[in-house]
Image (cartoon, helix red, strand yellow):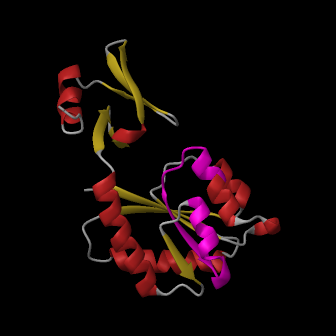
Amino acid sequence: MIPILRILVCDDEPSVYEKIGQYVRHYYTNRERDYELAYCPTAQALLDAPFDYDILFLDIMLDNGNDGIQIGRKLRAEGNSALFVLTTSRKDRALDGYQATVFRYLVKPVQRDEVKDVLDAAIRTLEYDKSIITVKFKYQTEYVHVKNILYVESYLRRRHIVTKEHEYPTTATWSALQEQFSAYVSTD
């Protein structure tokens, strides 16, 4: 199970973010899951943001004439593996979205049932697609997707799990880490 679903909305209209946020909050009412919701109001803010989100609601027509599909293609080229949900009032751009390997396409105004359907499908996809290990250090716990780990090293009595974006220190023993990784290592 995905411990925390991280959702990012990139749209130059704050009202769209507010509406999607309202639908996400409604979706999580009475559910035993945690989520984080963040907002990027501009294409540049999105390009500068770390790839630590699972779902990206991405407007096709962004600020200053930026094209969300082109931004999505650039993010993919840089290794972003989030599920992209394109949002737009332009139905004619739906097929263009496949250039950015999109998960879903929503026509504005986005409806609550559509967001619910996207979240249901995204959770199923992410639970199937992402293997997660738990990294504890001092008073915090991080969840790291196995496919994002570049390597694990040990120095100064700590293990360090390294991804492209972060380094996670832990005092877990090698055997404890191996136990977590054993579920994801093929024995063929």
Q: Nearer the viewer, residue 173 or 118?
A: 118
Q: Going by the picture, which residue comes out furthest to the right?
A: 64
Give the percent coordinates (x, y) of residue 32: 24, 67
Q: Residue at x 30, y 45 (%)?
A: 132
The stretch drawn in magenta includes residue 89: yes
Q: In this view, does 153 lie to the left or right of 57?
A: left
Q: Nearer the viewer, residue 149 or 167?
A: 149
Q: In which quarter of the image is residue 170?
A: top left
Q: Quadrant of residue 109?
A: bottom right
Q: Which residue is drawn at 60% across and 44% down?
A: 78
Give the percent coordinates (x, y) of residue 46: 65, 56
Q: Going by the picture, which residue comes out furthest to the top?
A: 156
The stretch drawn in magenta includes residue 9: no
Q: Residue at x 48, y 51 (%)?
A: 81
Residue 89 visible somewhere in the drawing:
no
Q: Which residue is drawn at 19% across and 39% down?
A: 183
Residue 8's place in the image compared with 165, above or below, is below
Q: In which quarter of the image is residue 43?
A: bottom right
Residue 177's place in the image compared with 115, above or below, is above
Magenta residues? 74-100
Q: Is residue 104 left or right of residue 73?
A: left
The quarter of the rendered structure image containing the C terminus is top left
The quarter of the rendered structure image containing the N terminus is bottom left
Give the percent coordinates (x, y) of residue 148: 42, 39
Give the percent coordinates (x, y) of residue 160: 38, 24
